[in-house]
Amino acid sequence: MSKKVLIARVIPSVAEDLLKQAGFTVSVWKGNQVMTKDELIEHARKVDALLSLGSNKLDRSFFETCKHLEIVSQFAVGFDNIDVAAATEFKIPVCNTPDVLSEATADVAFGLMINVSRKMFYNHKLILRGEWKQFEPLKNLGFELTGKTLGIFGLGRIGSIMAQRCKGAYGMNVIYHNRNRNLEAEKETNARYVDFDTLLRESDILSIHSALTPETAGLFNKHVFSKMKRTAVFINTARGGVHNETDLIERCKMEPSGVPVWMLPTPNRCRPTTPCFKCPM
């Protein structure tokens, strides 16, 4: 009898095809919304393996109920939604997909940086509202990226690619802060390791590429933002929980010349009325 696999959301069909070719019986949750915890447990009880997404909360109570699972495979690089300690306790291996989205995520961070430097989204909104009537030489000019200092918090795979892009395209100076130095990336990009306060003080662009951990959760708050340049740009393509959204919005209001921008990977936390969209970015 073949092993059963549950895919917790519709993903590219090649995944289902490969599993079936390998002899697995595959079921896919095809609902428009993420499964509730009860729904996930109900369906996971009937299978041997789970292919989860970052939107699925796999906490201790989930593993206590589904301790029969032979493996959990995460359709993502990050796994902060999974209680790995609990899974380990029940001898359930947890896998993720490191490096498959490194280039794509670096592209998003690079694109956000260019957008903010030239206020592309902001000016696009002006056009849609019919507020761009004529060229005004002193309005919404943006700023040059050439020669600016890129600060990276978390110089791993994605951070290194971001550094390479910025160094190659704009000759930017690269500084970074990690728990441990990344000597290979230093050689590739001439990046300079600095302490956290120096990173905040010297960065013109601060790009976040760290994991969401108890140490980084809410790390970028009002106190930290106050140490940055007034004109600095803050880009978060890691996890929304790394920064304090309320504090970032307040900083945006206080410093109209500096444009903080970020990306929240969890759509249910981002509404059309979210105050961040009113920032001139």
Image: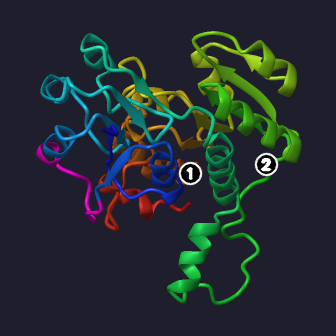
Residue drawn at x 50%, y 38% is 238
Residue 109 placement, left or right of 167: left
Q: In the picture shown, does residue 13 fall above or below 174?
A: below
* SS for dot 1: loop
Does the magenta-highlighted stretch encompass residue 101? no
Q: In the picture shown, does residue 143 fall above or below 158?
A: below
Exactly how many numbered labels are in the figure? Answer: 2
Q: Amino acid at mark 1?
A: Val
Q: Residues within 10 Å of mark 1 (few under 14, many from 20)?
A: many
Residue beneath disc 2: 145
Contact? badges 1 and 2 (CB < 8 Å): no
Residue drawn at x 58%, y 18% is 197
Q: In the picture shown, does residue 138 fall above or below 232?
A: below
Specify the quadrant of the image occupied by residue 150. Answer: top right
Query: Where is residue 38 shown, x and y percent of the image?
Result: 11, 44
Q: Amino acid at mark 2?
A: Leu
Q: Who is closer to the viewer here, 131 or 86?
A: 86
Q: Who is closer to the viewer here, 239 or 246?
A: 239
Specify the quadrant of the image occupied by residue 121. Answer: bottom right
Residue 259: mark:
1
Residue 157 placement, left or right of 249: right
Residue 51 placement, left or right of 260: left
Which contiguous range is marked in magenta?
Answer: 30-39
Distance from label 1 to label 2 (Cα)? 14 Å
How was the colour assigned to the protein in this rendering?
rainbow
- Image quadrant holding the N terminus, namely top left
